[in-house]
Amino acid sequence: MEILLAGGAGYIGSHTAVELVEQGHDVIIVDNYSNSSKEVINRIEKITGKQVQAFEADIKDKTEIMSIMKETKPDCVIHFAGMKAVGESVAKPIDYYRNNIDTTLTLLECMKECNVNQIVFSSSATVYGEENDIPYVETMKRGNCSNPYGWTKYMMEQIFEDAANADENLSVVILRYFNPIGAHQSGEIGEDPQGIPNNLMPYIAQVAVGRRDHLTIFGNDYPTKDGTCRRDYIHVMDLANGHLKAVEFARDHKGYHIFNLGTGEPYSVLEIVEAFEKANGIKIKYEFGDRRLGDLTEYWADAQKAQEVLGWKTERDIEDMCRDTWNWQKNNPHGYA
Ligand code: NAD
Ligand code: UD1
């Protein structure tokens, strides 16, 4: 299949591109590089040994996207293009609503006009909000989101559902990611956050490589075994494989479908630090700090549906996640720079 990856040069898009190409699909990457580097394209080509079509364009630019879709005639779109920093979304809500919602509407309009009928969307466990019981199941109601980033995901899911209800030709697959970490085993591509990392694993990796002095663990008084929050961390290559299954599913199924992509097994912040130390033989200096506003104590996925319907399950464990993260970071101490 020909698959257009909107935001395909980013962390999850680049790993998905490798997985799709290695499984015989052709990818078309469209990215404005607002949170990624053109070097990513070279790395994808190096890993796969294949040339990849890449266009520099803003997904909000309908004229550009129409022309790319007409030229490349994709069978399916995967929509990764979004802004994703929770704290920044509180400070710049308009930017988040504009970029995340507008990219979605533009893609849907262009798809309709170009007769492209399949789309897979990067959603997040954040849409379950605070009220649901754990583990999270796809049939649960979406909850209240605690920040504009979360609300954009909530609203985009609604837009996709309404679009699928109105158009019997459309296939929409919503993937709710839990906490993606790790990197491709080659160490050629990985997560390269700009500025101070917001998320746990990139922060640990930057402490390990000497770019940060120590990790601050946000709270050790939560009602968990060791007092730190628990999350469902998933290897980015397992997540990439989930997109492969989703694309194949969308080809054969019309309508609106939601899948959790997680392992179903939570780890605490301290367990992640210990796993990283053990996998890589490196000490991670840390201190306990205050709780971070908006953090939930613990949540993880019920991953049954993806296993039963998509035939997908995770194959990599926490040791693989920690080892591959470090392999990427130590080979690229300053990311793609
Ligand atoms: P990322 O920032 O690495 O990748 C997003 C890519 O989209 C970047 O390359 C960026 O340059 C591009 N982009 C953004 N706006 C664009 C626009 N208007 N036009 C063209 N390109 C644009 O992020 P990621 O971690 O790869 O996440 C991909 C998607 O998955 C995002 O929608 C994110 O919200 C979602 N998600 C990520 C996580 C996570 O932990 N990484 C968790 C849940 C959901
Ligand atoms: C965060 C977002 C979530 C988003 C997801 C993927 C928040 C509140 N949630 O999830 O909406 O979908 O990223 O982008 O931002 N931690 C530390 N020290 C650090 C960093 C993190 O102790 O320096 C802890 C956090 O308190 C949390 C755990 O590590 O308990 C994981 O944090 P993080 O990687 O930021 O992911 P989430 O908060 O789960």
Image (cartoon, grey):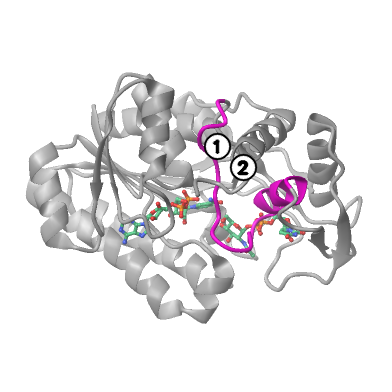
Viewer-closest of 159 and 281: 281
- Tag 1 residue: 236
Circle 2 packing at 10 Å, graded few (<14), some (14-19), many (20+), is many
* Front residue (pair 28, 133): 28
Residue 246 visible in rendering: no
Q: Amino acid at mark 1?
A: Val
Q: Can you give x and y, in whole percent of width and height, for residue 7 in the image?
A: 35, 50
**Magenta stretch: helix, strand or loop mostly:** loop
Spatial separation of the CA atoms under disc 2 and disc 1: 6 Å
Please tell me the numbered disc located at residue 181.
Answer: 2
Mark 2 and mark 1 residues within 8 Å of each other at the beta carbon:
yes
Q: Is residue 276 magenta?
A: no
**Residue 97 appears in the picture as rendered:** yes
User: Relative to 287, is 209 on the left or the right?
Assistant: left
Q: Residue 335 has which mark?
A: none
Quarter of the view holding residue 186: top right
Residue 90 falls in which quadrant of the image?
bottom right
Q: Earlier in the sequence, mark 2 or mark 1?
A: 2
Q: Quick one: SS at disc 2? A: strand
User: Measured from the top left, where is residue 253 in percent x and y?
Assistant: 28, 33
The stretch of residues the image draws in magenta is 186-209
